[in-house]
Image (cartoon, rainbow, N blue to C red):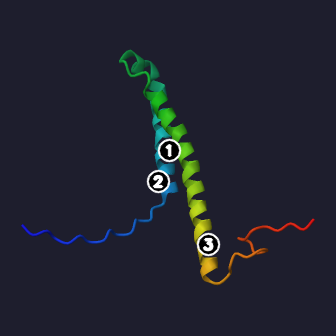
Amino acid sequence: MPKTPLRPSPPPLEANDVAIVGGGTVLWFVAFLALLPFKGTLEQHGHGTWPWICLSGGLLGLIGLWYCRARRDAIRRARAAEAEAAAGGGTGAGSPGGPATRLD
């Protein structure tokens, strides 16, 4: 059977990671608040940890949200620096992206 030639991989899709992680974080906190009134019933049936698992998911989601925002901002800064370099802005001494020179 003849092999088909490999095609190049498509470029990665752009997604709004901050919105995705933020939405998931909100859902974890909503689940925590929804389960909290049933804590006694859940404990009677051996599921007393469920609310705390949801709270942990929400707190970890806050860490993920911080990470995604920092990553998004770093990508924007890198793209801006690339665009400035491509436009001939350069990164020499004294320019915003270049090495700082202090004359004291």
Q: Quick one: label 3, few (<14), some, or many (20+) residues within 10 Å? A: few
In terms of sequence position, does the residue under pointer 2 or pointer 1 come before the other?
A: 2
Question: Which amino acid lies under the numbered mark 2 shown in the image of this protein?
Answer: Ile
**Which quadrant, please, contains the N terminus?**
bottom left
Residue at numbered disc 3? 80
Residue 30 in the image: state x and y as whole percent: 48, 39
The one nearer the camera, 97 or 71, is: 97
Residue at numbered disc 2? 20
Residue 81 in the image: state x and y as whole percent: 63, 72
Local SS, label 3: helix
The one nearer the camera, 40 or 52, is: 52
Q: Quick one: label 2, few (<14), some, or many (20+) residues within 10 Å? A: few
In terms of sequence position, does the residue under pointer 1 or pointer 3 come before the other?
A: 1
Local SS, label 1: helix
Q: CA distance from mark 2 to mark 3?
A: 24 Å
Question: Which amino acid lies under the numbered mark 3 shown in the image of this protein?
Answer: Ala
Task: For the residues labelled 2 and 3, say whether their Cβ atoms are less than 8 Å apart.
Answer: no
**Which quadrant, please, contains the C terminus?**
bottom right
Q: Quick one: label 1, few (<14), some, or many (20+) residues within 10 Å? A: many
Instruction: Please state which of the two labelled residues, at mark 2 or mark 3, is closer to the viewer.
Output: 3
- Residue at image coords 46%, 22%: 39
Question: Which amino acid lies under the numbered mark 1 shown in the image of this protein?
Answer: Thr
Residue at numbered disc 1? 25
In terms of sequence position, does the residue under pointer 2 or pointer 3 come before the other?
A: 2
Q: CA distance from mark 2 to mark 1?
A: 9 Å
Task: For the residues labelled 2 and 1, say whether their Cβ atoms are less than 8 Å apart.
Answer: no
Local SS, label 2: helix
